[in-house]
Amino acid sequence: MTNFSRRKFIITAGITAASTLIAHGCSSNGTNTDNSAGETTNSASPASNTSTSANALKVETTKARLGFIPLTDAAPLIIAKEKGFFAKYGMTDVEVSKQTSWPVTRDNLKLGSSGGGIDGAHILSPMPYQITIVDKVPMYILARLNLNGQGISVANKFKDLKVGIESKALKDVASKAKAENKATKVGITFPGGTHDLWMRYWLAAGGIDPDKDLGLEPVPPPQMVQNMKVGTIDAFCVGEPWNAQLVSQKLGYTALVTGELWKDHPEKAFAMRKDWVDKNPNAAQALLMAVMEAQQWCDKPENQEEMCKICSNRKYFNVAVSDILERFRGNIDYGDGRNAKNVDFRMKFWANNASYPYKSHDSWFITENIRWGKLPKNTNIQAIVDQVNKEDLWKKAAQALKLPANQIPASSSRGVETFFDGVKFDPEKPEEYLKSLKIKSA
């Protein structure tokens, strides 16, 4: 396939996904023939919290439109809707709306629901900063949605290289392809988003410059597997269930899951437009309380199967339950003979303070965006984090939920973070971290 055709396919996939997903839900790229995938929620329990809670606030509005991308870490929003947690706190008219890609999510947030868009979303943690700084639409991060749960997967043709936690085996492949004018193509979901940053960090740690040695291509998450199937990308970084589906269809294997890259790393966020929150503070707190309760519900082992059944439904993911469940349980079939059971770096919604929006983590995301030229070098990291990250609202919601003190972090920093290659990030010294990195654009 020519470079033009390859690029055309990826771009077309993102555009045509919109009509396909609206008409049929989020398809498994046309390859899932298990009709039960869209019907599994019939056996799931109906909404269980239909009465208003005693600690519900008097909300300014009962309506909100929230977006999500078909990824397992969207579960708290889906569960808050399906199990009645939004209604429990007085938000009886919440719409959880499927978005076809992260650029669509961004554009709909810029519009707001008054303009036909959305008020908030399940979103890549760096995006509210990009929207605030670049698009000039102020955003708030109200909570983190999860830790871990993403993967970097590669095509079967690389199995002999045994690519895993180390990426350096791909360097010669990328160099050879570049010499032959056949650039190695790597799929990420959104420039400057978490998947882009995990992929870039992994490649750079192996001595590969992601901007010079190969090509990074934005691809909507539900289209990753199909793009790998037809050969338009050679590797990708995305959230579940798409890595698991690639393995189940025997189209590639998972080199690593991102919890191996950075144990208990922050991933998605629950974010809303600043103007909506400022206008509707009680409604915003009600939404946050519902999402936080849903996060606790999702993390309980006895709810895991039901959660996956609900999310597998046609209107949400439209995939087989097995594509979601095993990796969520921490059982990882990498697809190359490696199998891991009950790993501690599985996706977490509540455990290990998963829901708390540590400002220190946002500092890393912004620093990495500066590293790769996605945000200006002169970005005042502390100032913008203080503006966007609303950990105070999270604590207020936590107190309203009467959470025990040991579940409410006392500090806005989780401290110094250590990555798989031994590199450390001190959130008090982001400039020193940036200067220490050998491969960067900034």
Image (cartoon, rainbow, N blue to C red):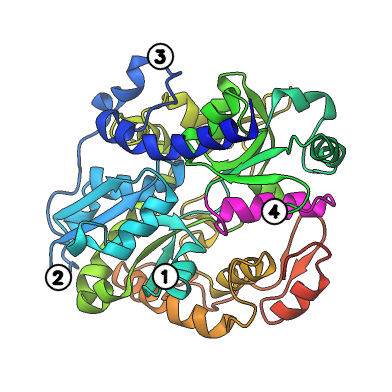
Q: Read off the residue under disc 3.
A: 33
In front: label 1 or label 4: 1
In front: label 3 or label 1: 1
Instruction: State left or right for residue 381 relative to residue 281.
Output: right
Q: Residue at x 79, y 35 (%)?
A: 163
Amino acid type, callout 3: Thr
Amino acid type, callout 4: Arg
Q: Alpha-carbon distance for marks 1 and 2?
A: 29 Å
Amino acid type, callout 2: Val
Q: Residues within 10 Å of mark 1 (few under 14, many from 20)?
A: few
Q: How crowded is mark 2: few (under 14 residues within 10 Å), some or many (20 or more)?
A: some
Quadrant location of residue 284?
Answer: bottom left
Q: Read off the residue under disc 4.
A: 200
Mark toward the start of the polypeptide (3 vs 1)? 3
Q: In which quarter of the image is the N terminus?
A: top right
Question: Do the CB atoms of the residues marked 1 and 2 lie less than 8 Å apart?
Answer: no
Mark toward the start of the polypeptide (4 vs 3)? 3
Instruction: State left or right for residue 281 relative to residue 75.
Output: left
Mark toward the start of the polypeptide (2 vs 4)? 2
Instruction: State left or right for residue 16 relative to residue 422.
Output: left
- State the image coordinates of residue 174 (x, y, percent, origin top left): 80, 39
Residue 316, placed above or below residue 272: above
Magenta stretch in the rendered image = 190-209
Mark toward the start of the polypeptide (1 vs 4)? 1
Q: Let me know if residue 201 is in the magenta part.
A: yes
**Viewer can see residue 389:** no
Q: Alpha-carbon distance for marks 2 and 4?
A: 43 Å
In what element is the residue under mark 1?
Answer: loop
Q: Read off the residue under disc 1.
A: 135
